[in-house]
Amino acid sequence: MLCRNKECPTHAFHPNQTGNAGTSDADARRKHRIEKTFRQRLFSEIRNKVNSLPGDKVTRIVAHAMWRRVGGDSKRALLKAAGHDVPRESIEQFGDRLLEKAGPVEVGRMLVCMAIADELMMPLSQAAKPETMLKLADVYGIEIKTIRDVVRNERKPGSKQKRNHTKAHPAAWPHFFRNESTTNYSLKGAVYV
């Protein structure tokens, strides 16, 4: 047998549809307001205690918090760029272990890398500049133009960059370069125009 009593605290369709819905909502709002005020005051107290560069313990806490906030694909790109090829399933744990065992210089390096991790990801649809990377390169005295020139002139082993693409007829290209429905072609591979 089904209970169809809308006032029943056990079987009501929604728990807040009971007769005391107003008091539970009021309680939830009151708890939320108290928690919000508590967090704001705690934030203020922590902010006021930071009078100099944070020590090792604080830096590690901040690094762990930043690691949790970095997106999954950015974490993978960050670790891959740092020379760690880690399977997707264990990226989170690997980063945590890395931060726990790292020395102060490595923790600082990870903080900088986490700050620019999302700039490693470069979607085809967006041509945004890596602003933070460029600012850091300026601070560290890195020659951006030199790196860009080296990358442009770099050849992959076995690549056929010298090949003249103007003579190739689009029908001769592999099928994944061609959008069969409109017969427009794209050199981006998976991106159809």
Image: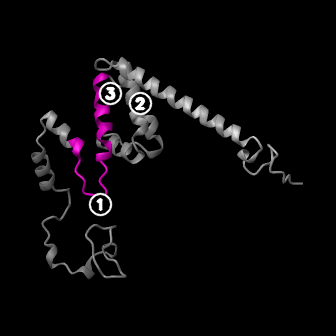
Looking at the image, tell me whether mark 1 or mark 2 is earlier in sequence order.
Answer: 2
Residue 95 included in the magenta stretch of the image: no
Say which element carries label 3: helix
Label 1 vs 3, first from the N-terminus: 3
Q: Are marks 1 and 3 in contact (CB under 8 Å)?
A: no
Where are the magenta residues, as a range?
104-133
Q: Nearer the viewer, residue 27 or 151?
A: 27
Q: Quadrant of the N terminus?
A: bottom right
- In which image quadrant can residue 99 be found? top left
Q: Is residue 180 left or right of residue 39?
A: left
Q: Give 1 or 88, whichever is nearer the viewer.
A: 1
What SS does tag 1 mark? loop
Q: Residues within 10 Å of mark 2 (few under 14, many from 20)?
A: some
Say what amino acid the circle numbered 2 marks: His
Chosen colour scheme: one colour
- Mark 1 or 3: in front is 1
Q: Which residue in the structure is indicated by mark 3?
A: 107
Q: Name the residue type under label 3.
A: Val
In the picture of the structure, the residue carrying the numbered disc 2 is 64
Cα separation, mark 1 vs mark 2, equals 30 Å
Residue at position x 43%, y 40% in the image: 91
Q: Which quadrant of the structure image shows residue 131? A: top left
Is 118 included in the stretch rendered in magenta? yes
Residue that label 1 marks: 124
Position in image of residue 157 (x %, y %): 20, 56
- Real-space Cα separation, disc 2 to disc 3, in angstroms: 10 Å
Residue at the image position 28 percent from the left and 20 percent from the top: 53
